[in-house]
């Protein structure tokens, strides 16, 4: 049995914890045992980990990467759990995996860069280099992230590995369920529904740019469905009122299972200012939706421009509106892009592919240390 200790920051509703849940569910439980250290955990994903029998250990927020009290808590978990692998994502997670992992003599130590770190300070890059000195590999979750790690952060190529994130292939909701859901949400047959999903933190996700695009379109039959919760939800509702489009926007809040909602959408839009991967874009493609995405970070790797959707510059409501109008006027183009996107997502971004690549990384690194624990 391979014991894996995952170190991340908060467990709420973000992509990092969703991918960890996908990994826990996708790896053979007769071969792997998991435990998670986080700064804080709560909500539906934390409940899902508990349902999978995975213990969450909360150590509290870090004041700085070398906080002794926090690393002592991690070392206590290492002493009891005796992991073969420690796998840290997000900066706090990388700190725990590198520092406590090295002091605790965990055989394999893996870092994972899950964000688009283009605005990272020189000090943070220096710390990441330091963490990698005590680690075996750093995973980049998209080609853009890998490029940053190699060219900007100047980390050694021998320690960088690309493993694209993966999403579970969704079951299609029956037409009757989708019809019922549309009625519940207040949509009419003639409405053209633009969907967007994510944590409502507008500085990053830029839902406000989609609202502005909707205003530019100036057509009451265009509707926007926003799935997610976060600190900027109230201000976005206010913005929709100010723009005079509040009757065209439906905010559902967080949904533990968003997949049926994808079935109500005609197209999907993600307007992020920056994005390490863009998990929801891959999910939308799995559902056969054409995707309008900003040309940033991992999104420009996931969405193939003019093939599975359109890429626009960030902070560009006018261009988002233009692409929505093109797709709304051409059902055949929507269908073709949706089919190409689904094929692309199935080939490159499935949970099965992701879990296999992570398992290979785990087993290969253990083998380099002369450790073979799989029977």
Image (cartoon, grey):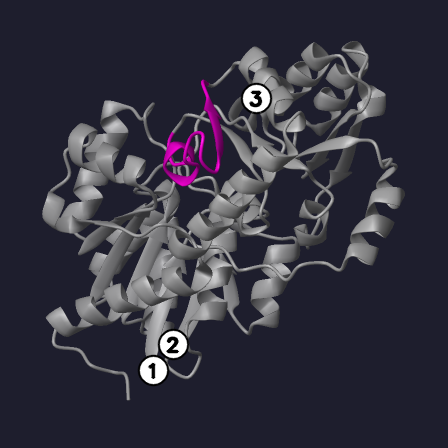
Dot placed on the residue nearer the N-terminal end, 1 or 2: 1
Regarding residue 59, the answer to whether it shows in the image is no
Q: Residue at x 23, y 35 (%)?
A: 147
Regarding residue 61, the answer to whether it shows in the image is yes
Mark 1 lies on residue = 1
Mark 3 against mark 2, which lies toward the viewer?
A: 3
For disc 1, the neighbor class at 10 Å (few under 14, some 14 to 19, many from 20) is few
Q: CA distance from mark 1 to mark 3?
A: 50 Å
Q: Quadrant of the N terminus?
A: bottom left
In the structure shown, which secondary structural element does the residue marked by tag 1 occupy? loop
Q: Residue at x 79, y 51 (%)?
A: 178
Mark 1 against mark 3, which lies toward the viewer?
A: 3
In the structure shown, which secondary structural element does the residue marked by tag 2 occupy? strand
- Residue stretch rendered in magenta on the structure: 297-313
Mark 3 lies on residue = 323
Mark 2 lies on residue = 32
Q: Quadrant of the C terminus?
A: bottom left
Decide which of 246, 32 is in the foreground and name it. 246
């Amino acid at each position: 049995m391979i014991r894996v200790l995952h170190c991340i920051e908060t467990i709420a509703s973000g992509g990092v914890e969703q991918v960890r849940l996908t990994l826990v569910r996708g790896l053979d439980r007769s071969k792997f045992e998991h435990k998670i250290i986080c700064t804080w955990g709560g909500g539906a994903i934390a409940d899902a980990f508990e349902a999978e029998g995975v213990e969450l250990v909360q150590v509290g927020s870090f004041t700085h990467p070398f906080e002794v009290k926090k690393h002592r808590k991690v070392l206590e978990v290492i002493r009891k759990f005796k992991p073969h692998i420690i796998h840290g994502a997000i900066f706090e997670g990388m700190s725990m995996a590198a520092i406590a992992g090295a002091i605790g003599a965990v055989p394999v130590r893996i870092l994972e860069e899950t964000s688009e770190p283009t605005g990272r300070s020189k000090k943070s890059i220096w710390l990441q280099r330091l963490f990698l000195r005590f680690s075996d590999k750093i995973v980049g979750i998209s080609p853009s992230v890998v490029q940053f790690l190699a060219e900007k952060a100047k980390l050694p190529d021998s320690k960088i590995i690309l493993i694209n994130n993966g999403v579970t292939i969704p079951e299609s909701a029956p037409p009757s369920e989708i019809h019922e859901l549309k009625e519940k949400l207040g949509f009419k047959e003639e409405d053209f529904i633009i969907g967007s999903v994510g944590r409502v933190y507008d500085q990053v996700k830029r839902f406000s740019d989609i609202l502005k695009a909707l205003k530019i379109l100036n057509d009451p039959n265009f509707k926007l469905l926003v799935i997610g919760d976060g600190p900027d939800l109230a201000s976005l509702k206010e913005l929709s009122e100010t723009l005079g489009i509040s009757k065209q926007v439906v905010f559902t809040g967080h949904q533990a299972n968003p997949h049926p909602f994808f079935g109500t959408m005609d197209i999907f839009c993600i307007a992020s200012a920056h994005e390490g991967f863009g998990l929801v874009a891959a999910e939308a493609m799995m559902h056969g939706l054409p995707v309008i995405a900003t040309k940033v970070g991992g999104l420009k790797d996931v969405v193939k421009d003019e093939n599975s959707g359109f890429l626009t510059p960030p902070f560009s409501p006018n261009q988002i509106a233009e692409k929505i109008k093109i797709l709304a006027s051409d059902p055949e183009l929507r269908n073709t892009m949706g089919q190409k996107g689904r094929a692309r997502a199935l080939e490159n971004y499935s949970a099965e592919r992701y879990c296999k690549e992570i398992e290979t990384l785990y087993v290969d690194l253990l083998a380099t240390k002369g450790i073979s624990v799989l029977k």
